Image: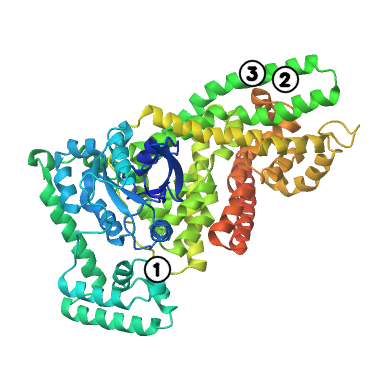
């Protein structure tokens, strides 16, 4: 039995890799349906025959060229950690594209390999008949057909892994490697380069793999060799070999080697995959739907309509359940006030805990509905189409079309959305996307929108909230254009991204995903928000005798200093100023602060908002909440992902200035027409 207890899962985005990971480990990691969901590796445990194995879910990649951060993470893990086994998850309905990564991993030669042909049901529905047994014998690796979302074939996969653990395999082909060979002159060149690799490098990296990467002019491996004492001499000989081959081939060696891999894969697929012409020749259902939803004229209106429906459902259905939570907290507050005679304790529970945390938790159904809508759009395959629909607009604004993916993720939370920019190959595109991502309305801001829209725009709440989200998108793409012209002039690379087939979302999966993401909201309410409202309650209670939440308390004095700044925007109330100030900790705290200061929740808080704000000043406050300083966690991740406090500081400065300016413009210009 091997002492190495690491099993890596590799595969293209949308191959169902994370679903297989969940089935093997019991992990409840969220499953998305477009590139970029799994950015960092995730780990789980698989117990086989009394032994625990670490299963690592690597980022989804199309190859091992390491042009993007996620590709580099996957390649570095495979090369340096040398897992005992690599299970390569392939979309069985698109083997020609998926096999490229599998071939490179076999070529790497550091681990035993098993190929998992996932989505076999999709392949069969397209009239494909795969002779997995014959292909397995030809390639010299086990092949396990699966349908991950139905857990079909998972036990077969565990059985194959178990055989590998015991040093056996179904075909007794245990040595890592690939049956694929390049044309003879390239093979000869690879062998020559392999013989030059210094022992210091060969001890850490497979010599043939290093030779292949040098022949493909991989900058990372050239740097590794250059650091050796004989590095320059070796690289000179490699360059001479490349130039010699390019004179023979008529084009660069890297392209030639890639074409040979694809040619080999195409031959394997042609030999072992049969397609029924009557089915294969007609458009799939996905193609027919795409002809409408990605149409150059209809695509954008359809996208906006779908998002509008999602937000209407978020508000209307979520609001129905919110009323019951509001009634519950009102009841608890009245019971507390009636039975607790200690004044400060009753104030703490009613004004602090219920007024603060309760005011936020009232909006939990809206948060859940938002995540449910996003999960349905992700799982159905539609969200990837959104990137294509927006691609032309994004390019016009100087932003990469693929940047739309982390921007949409920002509707959930800006922190993982910013981390998802690692899928962008171009550092300039990545930094721009990071800088504008906080303009996407995260779920933490939704309670603010729901509170103000319900109080001030009762007949059009959903549409008003939708307009805030659209405004965030518009601001993001406009600022991306400005930032690109200011900091990063140059061409934007075209969008090349897979469109996954449409799926009917599995109810259990989307509900579980929405619940898990909502649970983070609840945990934040019990930690960050709870801590914040305690601080706010204390500041609203002292000095003693000043009157709770009066202008003479500590928090009232702070608010009185800040309030004049917001008077031009129409909300120069010290309570509003304090709410925005503490909202820097977490955006939910804005509502929590208002609930604590006005010691009420739900409908009571809505009535207070309606008495203090006009629709115009309320909308200006919502826009300020959308744009101004990102929360502390977002600022921290901007610093980490850009490796620069300067960029983090710039994000804080521009968002504060822009948020205040927009709020003032909206109120002042709107007042002229009011």
- Front residue of 533 and 623: 533
- Front residue of 460 and 121: 121
C-alpha distance separating marks 3 and 1: 65 Å
C-alpha distance separating marks 3 and 2: 9 Å
Q: Identify the image quadrant of the C terminus.
A: top right
Q: Secondary structure at mark 3?
A: helix
Identify the residue at horizontal 41%, vertical 66% (top origin). Answer: 204
For label 2, the crowd category at 10 Å Cα-Cα, with few meaning under 14, some 14 to 19 and many 20 or more, is many
Q: Position of residue 10 (x, y in %)?
A: 35, 50
Q: Is residue 530 left or right of residue 20?
A: right
Tell me which label, 3 or 1, sits earlier in the chain: 1
For label 1, the crowd category at 10 Å Cα-Cα, with few meaning under 14, some 14 to 19 and many 20 or more, is few
Identify the residue at horizontal 68%, vertical 16% (top origin). Answer: 331
Residue that numbered label 2 is attached to: 333
Identify the residue at horizontal 42%, vertical 63% (top origin). Answer: 426
Tell me which label, 3 or 2, sits earlier in the chain: 3
The numbered dot on residue 203 is 1
C-alpha distance separating marks 1 and 2: 68 Å
Identify the residue at horizontal 18%, vertical 77% (top origin). Answer: 250
Q: Quadrant of residue 583?
A: top right
- Do residues under tags 1 and 2 come within 8 Å of each other at their CB atoms? no
Tell me which label, 1 or 2, sits earlier in the chain: 1
- Do residues under tags 3 and 1 come within 8 Å of each other at their CB atoms? no
The numbered dot on residue 328 is 3
Q: Secondary structure at mark 1?
A: loop
Q: Position of residue 562 (x, y in %)?
A: 76, 47
């Amino acid at each position: 039995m091997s002492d190495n207890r690491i099993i890596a899962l590799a595969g293209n985005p949308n191959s169902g890799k994370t679903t297989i990971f969940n089935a093997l480990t019991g992990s409840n990691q969220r499953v998305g349906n477009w590139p970029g969901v799994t950015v960092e590796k995730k780990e789980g445990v698989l117990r086989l025959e009394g032994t625990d194995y670490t299963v690592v879910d690597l980022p989804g990649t199309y190859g091992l060229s390491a042009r993007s951060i996620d590709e580099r993470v996957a390649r570095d893990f495979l090369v340096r950690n040398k897992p005992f086994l690599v299970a390569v998850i392939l979309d069985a309905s698109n083997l020609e594209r998926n096999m490229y990564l599998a071939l490179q991993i076999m070529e790497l030669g550091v681990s035993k390999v098993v190929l998992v042909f996932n989505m076999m049901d999709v392949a069969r529905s397209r009239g494909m008949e795969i002779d997995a047994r014959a292909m397995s014998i030809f390639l010299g690796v086990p092949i396990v057909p699966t349908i991950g979302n139905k857990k079909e074939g998972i036990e077969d996969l565990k059985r194959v892994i178990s055989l590998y653990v015991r040093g056996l395999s179904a075909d007794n082909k245990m040595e890592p490697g690939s049956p694929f060979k390049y044309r003879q002159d390239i093979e000869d060149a690879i062998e020559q380069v392999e013989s030059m690799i210094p022992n210091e490098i060969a001890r850490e990296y497979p010599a043939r793999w290093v030779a292949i990467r040098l022949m493909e002019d991989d900058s990372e491996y050239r740097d590794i060799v250059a650091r050796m004492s004989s590095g320059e001499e070796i690289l000179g000989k490699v360059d001479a070999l490349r130039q010699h081959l390019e004179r023979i081939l008529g084009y660069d060696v890297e392209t030639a080697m890639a074409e040979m891999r694809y040619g080999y894969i195409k031959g394997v697929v042609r030999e072992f995959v049969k397609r029924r012409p009557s089915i294969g020749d007609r458009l799939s259902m996905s193609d027919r739907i795409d002809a409408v939803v990605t149409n150059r004229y209809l695509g954008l209106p359809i996208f906006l309509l779908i998002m509008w429906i999602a937000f209407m459902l978020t508000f209307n259905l979520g609001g129905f359940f919110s009323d019951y939570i509001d009634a519950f907290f009102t009841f608890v507050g009245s019971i507390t006030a009636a039975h607790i005679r200690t004044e400060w304790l009753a104030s703490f529970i009613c004004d602090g805990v219920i007024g603060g945390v309760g005011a936020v938790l009232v909006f939990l159904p809206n948060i859940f509905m938002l995540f449910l809508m996003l999960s349905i759009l992700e799982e159905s395959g539609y969200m990837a189409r959104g990137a294509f629909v927006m691609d032309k607009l994004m390019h016009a604004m100087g932003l990469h079309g693929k940047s739309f993916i982390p921007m949409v993720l920002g509707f959930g939370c800006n922190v993982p959305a910013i981390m998802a920019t690692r899928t962008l190959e171009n550092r300039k595109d990545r930094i721009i996307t990071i800088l504008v991502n906080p303009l996407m309305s995260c779920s933490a801001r939704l309670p603010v929108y729901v509170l103000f829209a319900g109080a001030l725009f009762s007949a059009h709440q959903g549409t008003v909230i939708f307009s805030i989200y659209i405004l965030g998108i518009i601001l993001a793409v406009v600022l991306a254009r400005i930032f690109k012209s200011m900091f990063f002039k140059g061409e934007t690379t075209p969008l090349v991204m897979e469109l996954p087939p449409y799926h009917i979302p599995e109810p259990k999966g989307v509900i579980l995903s929405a619940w898990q993401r909502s649970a983070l909201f609840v945990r934040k309410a019990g930690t960050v928000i709870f801590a914040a409202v305690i601080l706010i309650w204390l500041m609203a209670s002292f000095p003693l005798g000043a009157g709770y939440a009066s202008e003479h308390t500590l928090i009232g004095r702070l608010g009185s200093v800040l309030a004049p700044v917001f008077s031009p925007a129409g909300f120069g109330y010290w309570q509003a100023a304090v709410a925005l100030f503490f909202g820097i900790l977490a955006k939910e705290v804005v509502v929590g602060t208002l609930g604590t200061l006005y010691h009420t929740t739900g409908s009571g808080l809505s009535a207070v908002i309606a008495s203090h704000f006009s629709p115009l000043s309320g909308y200006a406050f919502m826009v300020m909440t959308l744009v101004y300083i990102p929360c502390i966690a977002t600022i921290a991740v901007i610093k980490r992902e850009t490796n620069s406090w300067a960029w983090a500081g710039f994000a804080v400065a521009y968002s504060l200035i822009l948020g205040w300016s927009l709020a003032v413009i909206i109120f002042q210009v709107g007042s002229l027409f009011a």
